[in-house]
Amino acid sequence: MSVDSQAISLVRSSFKSVAAVEDGPERLARTFYSILFARSPETREFFPAAMDVQRDRLVGAIAHVVERLDESDAILEYLAQLGRDHRKYGVTDEHYTAVGNALIEALETFGGAEMWTDEVDSAWRNALAIISAAMMDAANAEDGPPAWSATVIECRPVIKGVAVVRLQLDQTMQYRAGQYVSVQVAARPRMWRYLSPATPYDGTGVLEFHVRQVTGGWVSPVMVNQTAVGDTWVVGSPIGALGIPENSKDLLMIASGTGVAPLRAQILELIRRGNTRKVQLFYSGQHPCDLYDLPHLWKLAEKHPWLTIIPVSEEDENPWWHTEPEPLPPIGMARRIVGKVGKVVTSFGDWAGYDIQVVGSESMVNSTKFRLRAVGIDVDTVRNDPTY
Ligand SMILES: Cc1cc2nc3c(=O)[nH]c(=O)nc-3n(C[C@H](O)[C@H](O)[C@H](O)COP(=O)(O)OP(=O)(O)OC[C@H]3O[C@@H](n4cnc5c(N)ncnc54)[C@H](O)[C@@H]3O)c2cc1C
């Protein structure tokens, strides 16, 4: 990516100053969408009727790219993935231009003449030209389907509020174990949500997702409670930087809740490859029952001595509504530890030399990285997906 360092710092500082204003991110997103829909009304149909989540996403996505403008390879790969994924909307090159122009106008309106100098304007135009070129080039070079149609073949509740959903794609989709995809269900048109396949690509076109219901959420309660065998979902192209690293480092994996899915996919892929490197998975949840996949992971660890599973829960007791007894660890498996996962992980050592991946909510990822930093880990090398 050839945005020079001075332009990068102008883009970052102007975006930061907008984001720092009270309700700044939300107001910027509102301004952006009203300009976009006024200038290019046809773009309105890409978005859901309720725009609240979409507004958070827009600002999250800009912040993610702005923070990483100097990591050329990683950000170009991410933008290429996003470009391939955006084919599901049917976007054209003209739409990218319309979005770029609306964003510039929104930032300028919002920032005012004092912040929006000629230098800032030219830095943003330069960065946006490179960003949209990376997305368009990848989208135009891709000859796979813009989206996959998928039929639900199984929907199984595993604990209250969490379901395992298995789908058969209409054609196979190549993805790396650890990546995620955007998904749309018929009852919530245009409300795309990201889910991480919990199994690796195996050529059969079967995807398995672990879905947790977010209270008050638009889509996840429908996915968990109203999915039936035979339903059709739509799935976008794979995205994400998680996955088995090409180096030979041992792996430290830290998950909370359904965040175990992309790590479990990698463990299954490592088994398929005949792995021997050490893999330590800290699998955490609020309550003991949140560790719904533990019996399956224990079975894998019994067969593969390179795999260690350390269960962690913040509370020692299950909530009142969960009445099933907690499964006992098989001989040789670690017992569950009570505490915050970041604190537990760092109590095991400094993890120098490990490849580290963290998957969970924004607060879990941030607090775990904070703990890792305190034991001397360079957290820039710790991998996690965007959490918006
Ligand atoms: C890279 C990535 C991978 C993901 N993989 C999975 C997965 O494998 N399985 C899975 O179940 N989910 C996964 N998610 C989360 C999923 O995409 C949705 O965000 C989540 O299901 C909520 O969608 P919703 O429509 O129900 O809630 P929304 O309508 O989007 O949100 C409603 C409200 O809930 C808040 N909210 C949203 N998500 C959460 C949350 N997780 N915890 C607490 N509050 C929240 C929002 O801020 C908002 O205020 C992933 C997210 C990302 C970014």
Image (tube, helix red, strand yellow):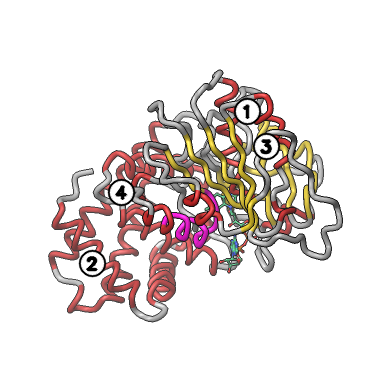
Relative height, residue 126 to residue 279 (above, below): below
Q: Secondary structure at mark 4?
A: helix
Q: Amino acid at mark 1?
A: Gln
- Indicate the position of residue 69 as horizontal and vertical percent values: 27, 51
- Indicate the position of residue 154 as horizontal and vertical percent values: 79, 39
- Indicate the position of residue 170 as horizontal and vertical percent values: 66, 31
- The answer to which image quadrant residue 171 occupies is top right
State how far apart marks 2 and 3 are (Cα).
49 Å
Q: Are marks 2 and 1 in contact (CB under 8 Å)?
A: no
Q: Amino acid at mark 4?
A: Ile
Q: Which residue is mark 2?
A: 13
Residue stretch in magenta: 359-369
In the image shown, does 299 or 387 lie closer to the viewer? 299
Taking the magenta stretch, the answer to whether it contains residue 75 is: no
Q: Is residue 283 left or right of residue 356?
A: right
Residue lying at 80% horizontally and 40% vertically, measured from the top left: 230
Q: Which residue is mark 1?
A: 171
Q: Which residue is mark 4?
A: 131
* Disc on the earlier residue, 1 or 4: 4
Say which of marks 2 and 1 sits in front. Answer: 2
Q: Which residue is mark 3?
A: 333
Number of other residues with Cα within 10 Å of mark 1, as a class: few under 14, some 14 to 19, many 20 or more:
some
Residue lying at 75% horizontally and 61% vertically, measured from the top left: 317
* Disc on the earlier residue, 4 or 3: 4
In the image shown, does 43 or 17 lie closer to the viewer? 17
